[in-house]
Amino acid sequence: MAMVTDLSGIKRIVQPLEDSGVLVQRTDEELLKTLDSFVVVEREGQIIACAALFPFFEEKCGEVAAIAVSPECRGQGQGDKLLDFIEKKASSLNLEMLFLLTTRAADWFKRRGFSECSIDMIPEKRRKDQSIP
């Protein structure tokens, strides 16, 4: 689970993806506010990957977000390991469905068992509140 001391490491790996439009831009304040939803992978004291799970308990579903792997570790299965962990965490929280909003990397998620769905299938709160990271 991510801690406050992980903030700079998370920013280091998500910043290039935010800059290129792959990930949603998040301020340090937004990251800190949602830090308890993030998980990180460390190697030799450095954050090499992160992901977030934002649960919607009433709807029994969760949003997968901010999956990022440092460039030097891509292709080593860190993204797969993170998604496995997120799926297990969602199950332990009794969430029955996971969703993500993406325009990129959809093929990777499809290979992992995700399928495209209507925006109407995600929680209304998420559809309406564009400030949710």
Image (cartoon, helix red, strand yellow):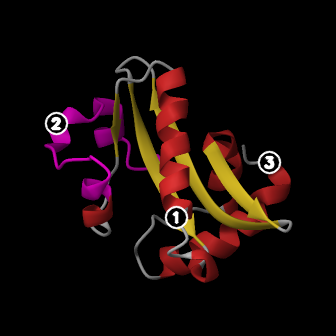
Q: Give residue 45's position: percent from left, percent from top.
A: 86, 66
Residue 112 colored magenta?
A: yes
Q: Tell me where the magenta segment starts and ends, as one range.
A: 109-133
Look at the picture and state if 106 lies above or below 115.
Answer: below
Q: Is residue 28 left or right of residue 115?
A: right
Q: Is residue 19 visible?
A: yes
Query: Which residue occupies the extreme left position in the image?
Result: 118
Query: Which residue is under mark 2?
Result: 120
Q: Is residue 85 left or right of residue 106?
A: right
Pick whichever, 119 or 2, lies toward us: 2
The quadrant of the picture occupied by the N terminus is top right
Please check the rendered image and state whether residue 30 is part of the magenta-colored stretch, yes or no.
no
Q: Nearer the viewer, mark 2 or mark 3?
A: 3
Q: Which residue is mark 3?
A: 3
Q: Are marks 2 and 3 in contact (CB under 8 Å)?
A: no
SS type, badge 2: helix
In the picture, measured across the screen, residue 53 lies left or right of residue 7, that is left
Direction from residue 25 to residue 119 in the image, left or right? left
Residue 62 falls in which quadrant of the image? Answer: top left
> Residue at image x 49%, y 44%?
84
- Identify the mark nearer the N-term, 2 or 3: 3
Q: Is residue 63 above or below residue 17?
A: above
Q: What is the total number of numbered labels drawn onto the structure image?
A: 3
Give the image location of residue 116, x and y in percent. 17, 50
Give the residue type that dot 3 points to.
Answer: Met
- Residue on which the image places disc 1: 77
Mark 1 or 3, which is nearer the eye? 1
Displayed quadrant of residue 31: bottom right
